[in-house]
Image (tube, rainbow, N blue to C red):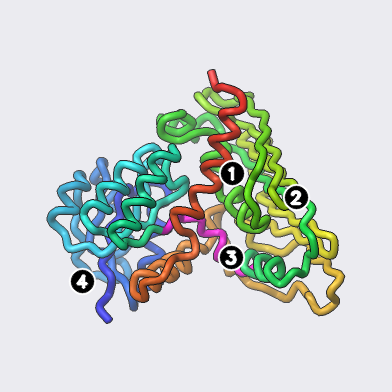
Amino acid sequence: MQKLKCAIIGCGRISYKHVEAIINNSEETELVALCDLIEDRAIARQEQYKEKFPEAKVSIYTDYKKMLKEVDIDYVAIATESGYHGEISLDCLNEDVNIIIEKPMAMTLEEIDSINELSDKKGLKVAVSHQNRFNPPIQKLRKAIDEGKFGNLINGTARILWTRDQNYYDMAPWRGTKALDGGTLMNQCIHNIDLLLWMMGSEVVSVKSERGTFLRDIEMEDFGAILLRFANGSIGIIEGSACVYPKNLEETLSIFGETGTAVIGGLAVNEIKTWNFEDENEKADDLDSGKVENVYGNGHTPLYKDFIDAVNNDTQPLVTGYEARKPVEVILKSYEEKKWP
């Protein structure tokens, strides 16, 4: 089977994880092009790839539309500012190219619905980078829920207690803006919101929220809290902060049921902290997510593998556009409850 040809649009902060994932799946995929408005960023990612594959031919572009016309590409990874995800995704799909989209999938539900409708119409694959779903402890947690180990679910809590100082926002003026980024809930907390919704496995029937901009000079919130009620009666609690002093404190997913309690924490929700069940056979075995260097974790590599398999076998990836719509909808509905100034 021929290797799938991949291009990356957007070579900023997260893009090195996408190059790393392509390298780690090199038996099935290869990088053929990179695009960024700042050419030096694309060149840096080209050099990262060529350290592993010195003979590789990786074209550099500053115009992604030109790249789509000139390069033979099977799929594109979109890692630009969030506010551009929708437009770029639709342009790629209209060129019959499959896509992996960094979170959030897009900034509006209208854009997300257009992406899903067009991909369905064209028979193309869409995956979204909620890579923490692939962490072994998260996979184990989902399996325990599917097997009924928790009994009836009572509540789940997703907590992102991080710090993002003013310099973080000043380095890239799009950060913290309503049009291109959103606040802490949309940017930092969306991964854990996705995990919470996936675990609770029920439709959200009500959303209540409180948000504020306490410390950072940004347009959107630097702290937000959301309270959810699910159709199955369970409750979800979301807490997202960029204000923790003096450094990141925790990223934690907790699930509570009548016969089980589990807490997954660590730098990138990659470690089992609590694992208690009525079923004595349900043990917290020594799962190894590998060395985690930062909050991005190690999930991009298995996410790419899952996506490549979906393209090759005409199946659906784990994190489809329809799945990725859910956390965006919760966040946008939390904003609607109180009109933002």
Q: CA distance from mark 2 to mark 4?
A: 55 Å
Q: Quadrant of the N terminus?
A: bottom left
Q: CA distance from mark 3 to mark 2?
A: 24 Å
> Which residue corresponds to mark 1?
189
Q: Please tell me the numbered disc located at residue 55.
A: 4
User: Helix or strand or loop: what does disc 1 sit on?
Assistant: loop
Q: Is residue 133 magenta?
A: yes
Label 2–label 1 contact, CB within 8 A:
no
Find the distance from the CA under tag 3 to the CA under tag 1.
17 Å
The amino acid beneath tag 2 is Ser
Residue at 48% across, 68% down: 302
Residue at the disc numbered 3: 135
The residue tagged 2 is 234
Question: Sequence order check: which comes first, mark 2 or mark 1?
Answer: 1
Residue situated in front as seen by the camera: 84 or 93: 93
Please tell me which of labels 3 and 2 falls first in the chain. 3
Task: Tell me the mark number nearer the camera, choosing from 2 and 1.
Answer: 2
Mark 4–mark 3 Cα distance, whole angstroms, equals 33 Å
**Secondary structure found at label 3:** loop
In three-dimensional space, the C-alpha distance between marks 2 and 1, rounded to whole angstroms, equals 20 Å
Query: What residue type is disc 3 on?
Result: Asn
Badge 4 vs badge 1, beta-carbon distance below 8 Å: no
Of labels 4 and 3, earlier in sequence is 4
Considering only vertical position in the picture, is 40 above or below 262? above
Residue 333, position in %: x, y?
Answer: 57, 35
